[in-house]
Image (cartoon, coloured by chain):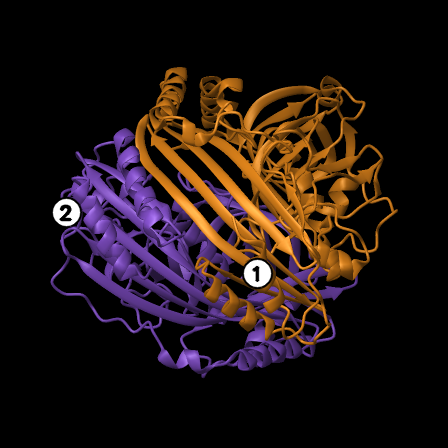
Chain colours: A orange, B purple
Amino acid sequence: MFEKQKVYDILSEALSFGGDFSEIFIEYNKKNNISFINGKADKIISGFDYGLGLRIFSGERIIYSYTNDLSYDHLMKMAREASLAADKNDGAVINDFVEKDYSGDSNRHKALIMPSDVERQVIADMLFDASNSAFKYSNLISQTNMGYFDSTQEVLIANSRGLWSRDKRVRTRAFISAVASSKTEKQRGYLGPGALKGLEFYDEIDLNEMAEEAARSAVTMLKADFCPGGKMPVVIDNGFGGVIFHEACGHSLEAAAIAKNASVFCDKLGEQIASEKVTAVDDGTIQNEWGSINVDDEGAEGRKNVLIENGILKSYIVDQFNGKKLNMGSTGSSRRESYKFAPVSRMTNTYIERGEDKAEDIISSTDYGIYAKYMGGGSVNPVTGEFNFAVNEAYMIRNGKIAEPVRGATIIGKGAEALMNIDMVSDNLRLAPGMCGASSGSVPVDVGQPMIRVNNITVGGRG
Amino acid sequence: MNIKEFKKIIFKEAEKHGITEFELFYQMDKNFKVSVFQGEIEKYYNNSSGGVSFKAIIKGKTGYAYSERLDRESVDFLLESVIKNSEIANDEGEYIYQGDEYYPEVNVFNERLDNYDPNFKIKLCKDIEKAALSYDKRIISVKSCFVGTNESETYIANSENLELFQKSNYASVYVLVTAEDGNIRKTGGEFWRGMDFGPINYVKIAENACRKALSLLGSEPVEKGEMNIIFKNEAFADILTTFMDCFFAENCQRGLSLLKGKVGERIASERVTIKDMPLFEGGFATRGFDSEGVASYNKTVIENGKLNTFLYNLKSAAKDNIKSTGNGFKASFKSASSTAATNFVFEKGEISFDELIYKLYDGLIITGLSGLHSGAEPISGNFSLAADGLLVKGGKVLEPVEQITISGNFFDVLKNILNVSDDLYFGMETSKGAVVCPSVLVKNINVAS
C-alpha cells in the first residue's frame, strides 16, 4: 500500500515541532449500494473512498488532518502544518515498524465470497424476490423498500511507536422494509441483517422470510391503537432490544465521556450500578459478527471486555488517548467511520449476558405493562444519562398475557435508574446489527440481550 | 490531477465507450476546526477532501459511481461501474439538463474569511469557554466548545455543454455546557454560523448556552394528558426538518406523502406560510443552482394554510409534466440526486415570544426534543418524543419539567397552530435543507411523564 520509508518520513515530519505520538490511517474502501422501491431498481451507486488521516498527540491535545491527495509532497506539507499545532517538543522518536497483517490468513473474520465476484443481477434478483414476498403477505402492503450494501475496506495503520498493521474488512448488510397502508395511516416494518463477511451471508439467511416478517409487523401495527402513556413495567424482547443497554449505559461508559467527567458513571468502578441480574459484555472478537473487528482503528486487537458483572461496574470502554488520561489500558475498541475521523472509544458487539429467568415466566408474572417486541433506534445524552428510544412493535401485557398490539410507544429514562430497575433477565440471548453514530462517525455495532423486564419506566404514548 | 484535466479525460473516454449522455459532479471541501477544554486546545483539525461522481444514461438507464481519487485509474473505475450499474437500473425518464438562460448571483463567499489565522480562532474559542464558565457557578463544565471555518467548491459539467461553478464558505461556533444543581444535571448548547467573524458576539453565544442549561434545572411534576404547548423555535425547527419529506414531489409519486393530491387545499392553519428560499440573503442553504444544474428561485410552499406546490427535481418534475423547482440536491457528491429544500422559511408572526407565552396562559413550552430519528414516523406524521420543557401557569413561566414525552401528529400540528411569534431561528443546515422558523403555539398535544 505504502512504502515504509515514506511513512517514516511523514510520521517524523508530524513530530518536527513537538508532540509525543504520530499516526497515519490509510483507507481504500470500495462500496456498493443498491436500493429497490416496489421491486424496481431505484438507486445503484458504486464508490471508492480513498484517503489518509494523520493524528498527533501533544499532551492533552489531539491534532488531526485528513486528505485524499496522497502524494508524498502534499502529505509532508500537511504533516508539517499539523505539527505546528503541537505545544511543546517532547523529543519523541520513531520506533522501528513491527509488521502485522490481518488482511490475509490471520484474518479472524474471513470473507468467502468477495462482493466484487458477484454479478449485480444476482443481487437485483434477490431484492426483487424479497419485495414480492412482502407484497404477497398482505394486500395492505402498499410499498416495499429493499436495500443492499457492501464495503471492502483495506486499511494501513502505522504509528511512531512502531505499529504497522494492515487489515481488510468486508461487510455486507440488507435493508428490508414494508409499509402497510390504510386510508389515513401508514406503518412500516423493518429488518436490517448484516455481517462482517462476504456474500456467503445471503446463503445463510432468508431475505424472503425477513420480508414477510417486516410485512407482518407493518400490518400488525396498522391495526394497533395508540399506546397508553405513564410509568409501568416494560418487557423488552431479545436481539435489537439490547439497544436499551447501548443507549442507557454503553455510551456513558466510553472513556471520552469518563475522562471529561461528563458521565454519570465516573468514579464508579467496583460499585454497583445495575441490578444484580445484569452482566454486560462488549466483545469485538465474535467471528464474522457485524460489530466485530480484527484490530480497532488505532491498531489494538479486538477483545472481550466484561463491563458489568452481576451489577458491579468492572470496566470502561477505553481508547489510547483517553486511557492515558485515566491511567487505563486500551480495551481494543477505538473506532472511526473512515479516515475522516479521529478514532475514539466506541462499542463493538455489546450485550447483556444470559440470565436464569424464562421468557414465559417474565410475561406471566407481569400484571400490566408493555411488551416491546421490536425496538427502533434511540439516543442518549451521556452527561445527564437521559435516553429515549422508540418501540416499533409493541403489545399490552394484561394479567400475565400478551394482549392487543399498540403503536407509537417511546421509552424514556435515565441510564443509572433503568439499570437498577431491570428485575428479570431470561436465557434467550440474541444479537442484532445496527449503526451507531457519535463523534468518530457512524460505525457498525451489534446490540443484544435476552428478554428482560424493566419494572418501572416512563412510556410515552397517546392512548 | 486537477478537475479540469480529469473532466477532459473522462469525457473523452466516455465517448470512446459510445456513451453520449453523462454528467460529472465535483465537490471539494476544506475545513478547519479547533476545540478547547479547560483553557487548553483539545482538538485541532485541518482537512481537505472531495471527489467526483459520474452519472451516465446508457440505453435509457442511469448508472452512478463516485471516487475520492482523481487519477486515470478512477476514470476506468467510474466508467466500468456506471456501465454495470446501468444494466440493472430501471428506465425512469432521467435526463441530462441543458441549463437555464439566467443564473442568479448569490453572495455565499467571503474572501476575508481566509484572513483569520488559527491563533485568532484559538483565542476566540478560549474566550467563549471562559465566558461560559464564569456566567454562573452552577455551570460546572463546558462539554464542547469549537470554532471552525468551512470552504466548499462545486463544479458541474455535462454532455449538454453545461458548466457551472460555485464557491462558498462560512464560519461557525458551537458551545455545549453542563449545569448542575443538587442531583440534577442538564446541558445547553448554542450554535452560531456566519460569513465573517467580524460581527460575532461571543459573550452572548456563551450566555445563551448557559441560560438554556440553567433554565432546565428543576423538576416540576406535570399532569399527563392533552394540553396546549409552545414549540420554542429551536424545537419547532427540529419538527419541521424531521417531517419535511412530505413536501417533496418524489415522495408523493411513491405514495410516501399523505399530502399527495392536496395542492390547492387547506392543509394547515391560516397562520402558516412556508417558503423555500434559495436566494435568501444570509441563509445557510443559499445557492444559485441545484445539484442538477437548475437555476434557483424562491417559491411559496404553503400560503396562509393552503398547499401551493411540492418541491421538484428533474425526474419528479418530468413525471408531473412541469418544470423542476430547482430542488434536486445531493447530500454529497457520493449520492445520487434526490430532493431537498434550501432555506425552508416559516414566516414569522407579529407578536413577541413573551406575548406568545401569555396567549398560551396555561401549558408547556417545549424547548428541546430528542429521539427524532427514531420516535418520529416521517410518513404517517406520528411522533412520540422525549422533551425538555418549562411549565407555564397564568401566563408566567414556572419551573422546568423533567422526563416527559410529547406525542401527536405533524399534520395535526400544522392545522392546530393557534399563533406564531416573531423570534426567527436559523436551524442548522442538514441534507434536507436549512429550516428558518419562529416559535409556535399549538393546541392539543399529548404529554406523558
- The chain identifier of the residue carrying mark 1 reads A
At label 2, which amino acid type do we have?
Ile
Cα–Cα gap, marks 2 and 1: 49 Å
> Marks 1 and 2: in contact by CB < 8 Å?
no
Q: Position of residue B361 (x, y in %)?
A: 53, 62
Residue B411 appears in which quarter of the rendering?
A: top left
Q: Residue furthest left?
A: B101
Q: Position of residue B104 (x, y in %)?
A: 20, 68
**Mark 1 residue crowding within 10 angstroms, few (<14) / some (14–19) / many (20+):** many
Q: Position of residue A150 (x, y in %)?
A: 46, 35
Who's the residue at 76% across and 30% down the image? A353
User: Relative to B146, does residue A189 appear above or below in the rendering?
Assistant: above
Give the structural element (helix, strand or loop) at label 2. Answer: loop
Of B435 and A395, nearer the camera is B435
- The chain identifier of the residue carrying mark 2 reads B
User: Relative to B182, does residue B448 appear above or below in the rendering?
Assistant: above
Relative side of B268 to A300, left or right? left
Who's the residue at 25% across and 50% down the image? B10
Q: Label for residue A279?
A: none
**Mark 2 residue crowding within 10 angstroms, few (<14) / some (14–19) / many (20+):** few
For the C terminus of chain A, the image quarter is: top right
Residue at the spot of label 2:
B322
Relative side of A68 to A246, left or right? left
At label 1, which amino acid type do we have?
Leu
Residue at the spot of label 1:
A54
Answer whether residue B46 is visible to the viewer in this image.
Answer: yes
Of A391 and A110, nearer the camera is A110
Q: Position of residue A287 (x, y in %)?
A: 65, 29
